[in-house]
Amino acid sequence: MSSLKAYIITRTLMVIPTVLILLTLVFFIMRILPGDPISAMVGQKVPEEVLERMREEAGLNKPLAVQYIDYLKGVFTGDLGNSMIWGRRPVVEEIMDRFPATLELTIFGFTISVLLGVLTGSIAAFRRGSKVDAGMRIYSVVAYTLFIPWFGMLLQMLFGVYMKVLPIGGRITPGLAPEHITGLYVLDSILTMNLESLKASLLHLLLPSLTLGIVLSGAYTRILRNNLIDVLNQDFITAYRARGVRERKVIKHAMKNAFIPVVTLMGLQFAILLAGAVLTESTFSWPGMGTFLLERIEYRDYNSVQGAIVFYAVFVALISLVVDVIYALLDPRIRY
C-alpha cells in the first residue's frame, strides 16, 4: 500500500472519533439547555398530561443514557431520526431540502472571494511598494473587518431600495422555481433550458454572493501578496530570469509556489462558508442550512440540530481530506 493511500485511510478513520465527540457534546448540550421541543412547539398553556403524552411519543421521557444509545444506533445505521416539530419529517429529507440552497450560495460566494483575492493579491505583489499596493492592502483590511449583516444591508439599500435593480431577499421570484433535478436553481435552470428561471436565480444570488465574496476575499489578498513577494525574492526565481526564461513562465512558477498556503485557506474557507453562512442567509432571507439550524435550535428540535451537525462534520472532514491531498500534489516535498 502506498504512503498516500495509507494516509488517506488513516485520515478517513480519524473522522469517526471526531464526529462521535462532536455528536456527544451536541447531544448533551441540547438537553442541558432549558426547555424541550414539545413545550417550544405547543407552548405552556397545553395541559400537563397532554405534554407528557407528547413527550412519551417522542421518546423524551426515557433515561438520558437510553436516549443517547438509541441515537448512536440510529446514526451508525444512517438514520438521523425524525424532526420533532411540524410534520415530523425524516431529518435527512429536511437537510436535503435546505442543503442545495446553502451549497449554491457557498459556491458563488467562494468563487467571487477567490477571484477577487487572487486578483488583488497578485496586483499588490507585482506592484510592491507602489500606491496600488497600498490601496490593495487597505482593501484587504477593510474587507476582512466588514460585518456581514451591516454590509449586506448596505448592498440591499443601494441596489435594492434606491436603484431597484436587484432583489433584496429570497432565492428566486415566486412561481419561477425550475423543475427539481439537483436542487441547485442555476444548474436546474440550465439543464431544463429555463432562461427566465436562470435570470431570476442569478439576480437573487448576486447580492448575498457579493457580500460573502468581498468579505472573505481580504484574507486571500493578504496571504497571496505576502507569499508571492517571498517567492519572487527566492534564488530559483532569480536563476530563471538569469537563464533568460520568459517572464510569463517565471510568473507561472512563482504563482504555483505561492498558491500552496492559499489552497489550504481555500479549503478552510469553503468549510466555513458551508457552516457559517448563517449571517448571510438571515440577512437575505435565504432558505438554507443556516436558517434551518437557527430555527431548529430555537425550537429545541434535538434530532434536526444533531443531524445537521453530523452532516456538517462529515462534509468538513471530507473537504479537509481533499485539501490535504491537493496540497501534497502541489508541493512534491511533502511525503507521508
Image: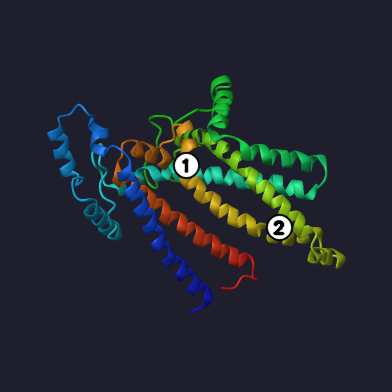
Looking at the rendering, which quadrant does residue 192 occupy? top left
Q: Where is residue 104 in the image (x, y as percent from the top left)?
A: 47, 44
Crowdedness near tag 1: few (<14), some (14–19) or many (≥20) residues, C-alpha within 10 Å: many
Frontmost residue, 184 versus 42: 42
Mark 1: secondary structure = helix
Which of the two discs, 2 and 1, sits closer to the camera?
A: 2
Q: For the point 54% across and 52% down, which residue is it?
A: 268
Amino acid at the residue labelled 1: Val
Q: Which image quarter holds the C terminus?
A: bottom right
Q: Mark 1 points at which residue?
A: 186
Amino acid at the residue labelled 2: Met
Q: For the point 57% across and 28% down, which residue is it?
A: 155
Mark 2 and mark 1 lie on one chain; the one further toward the N terminus is 1
Q: Is residue 174 above or below residue 90?
A: above
Looking at the rendering, which quadrant does residue 157 occupy? top right
Mark 2: secondary structure = helix
Frontmost residue, 324 versus 197: 324
CB-based contact (under 8 Å), mark 2 and mark 1: no
Q: Position of residue 128 (x, y in %)?
A: 80, 48
Q: Residue 255 carries which label?
A: 2
